[in-house]
Amino acid sequence: MPFFLTQLFSSIAISLSLTLLFSFSLSAACVNRPSTMSAESASAIPKGQVDLLDFIDWSGVECLNQNSSHSISNALKQGYREDEGLNLESDADEQLLIYIPFNQVIKLHSIVVKGPEEEGPKTVKLFANREHMGFSNVNDFPPSDMAELSVDNLKGKPVTLKYVKFQNVRSVTIFIEDNQSGTDITKVQKILLYGTTVETTDMKGLKKIEDH
């Protein structure tokens, strides 16, 4: 075989070896690379659930023991809840009692309650279709569901509810019983409610959860 062909084949062989070695190293790096996703992005929300913001009857929303300068609007209304500098804050003590009615019947699937690690909510109880609750009688009724919020929950990981308990919901009451550090002030940065409407099939007007 002529000398120049020997050199050519040798160069091709070296090039192929280097290419295969680089590809193997790149694949190994991708497999072994640790995940850096946040708790919020890592949490998988079932498809078909939507943000129920547009179905809240704002005229009936109430929050007991809120600081008048840091009201429920900061955590619940669009635009306010996206501003991390705004919070719902408790007033006389750490507890908050939030009543949210809807303008049509909904199915509630999950809830997000974001807040700071120290002053964020800890024990959260939810009541479906329970009217006229106050601090004097909130412990007289069993909650439809309850949760102890973790650090991941406070960062945005949704709490999946007992779906069978929230099938025909006209209103939901959220009782924040205490906070993470046991201080007198509880702070809530954002509240999101996810689910579907019972009778509406046209989903065009709904804000898909994937937009968040």
Image (spheres, rainbow, N blue to C red):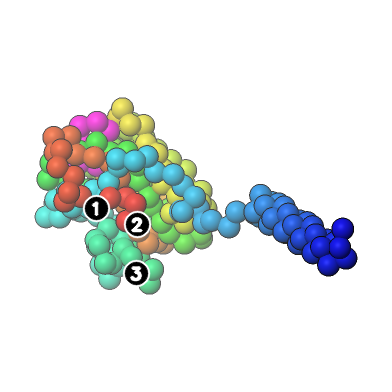
Numbered tag placed on residue 164 in the rendering: none
Instruction: Decide whether residue 212 is among the magenta residues.
Output: no
- Local SS, label 2: loop
Residue 130, image quadrant: top left
- Residue 103 shows up from this direction: yes
Residue 197, image quadrant: top left
- Local SS, label 3: loop
Instruction: Examine the rendered structure and indicate whether residue 116 appears above or below residue 196.
Output: below
The image quadrant where one finds the C terminus is bottom left
Badge nearest the viewer, 2 or 3? 2
Which residues are the magenta region? 166-172
- The picture places residue 52, in percent across and down from the top left corner, at 23, 48
Q: What residue does disc 3 label? A: 83
Q: Residues within 10 Å of mark 2 (few under 14, many from 20)?
A: few
- Residue 105 shows up from this direction: no
Please state if 52 lies on the left or on the right of 163 as rendered.
left
Residue 124, image quadrant: top left
- The picture places residue 105, in percent across and down from the top left corner, at 15, 37
Mark 2 and mark 3 residues within 8 Å of each other at the beta carbon: no
Q: Residue furthest front?
A: 2
Give the residue displayed 20% in from the left and 50% down from the top: 206
Instruction: Examine the rendered structure and indicate whether residue 78 appears above or below residue 143.
Output: below
Q: Residues within 10 Å of mark 3 (few under 14, many from 20)?
A: few
- The picture places residue 86, in percent across and down from the top left corner, at 34, 69
Q: CA distance from mark 2 to mark 3?
A: 14 Å
- Local SS, label 1: strand
Q: What residue does disc 1 label? A: 207
Give the residue displayed 28% in from the left and 67% down from the top: 80
Q: What residue does disc 2 label? A: 212
Mark 2 and mark 1 residues within 8 Å of each other at the beta carbon: yes
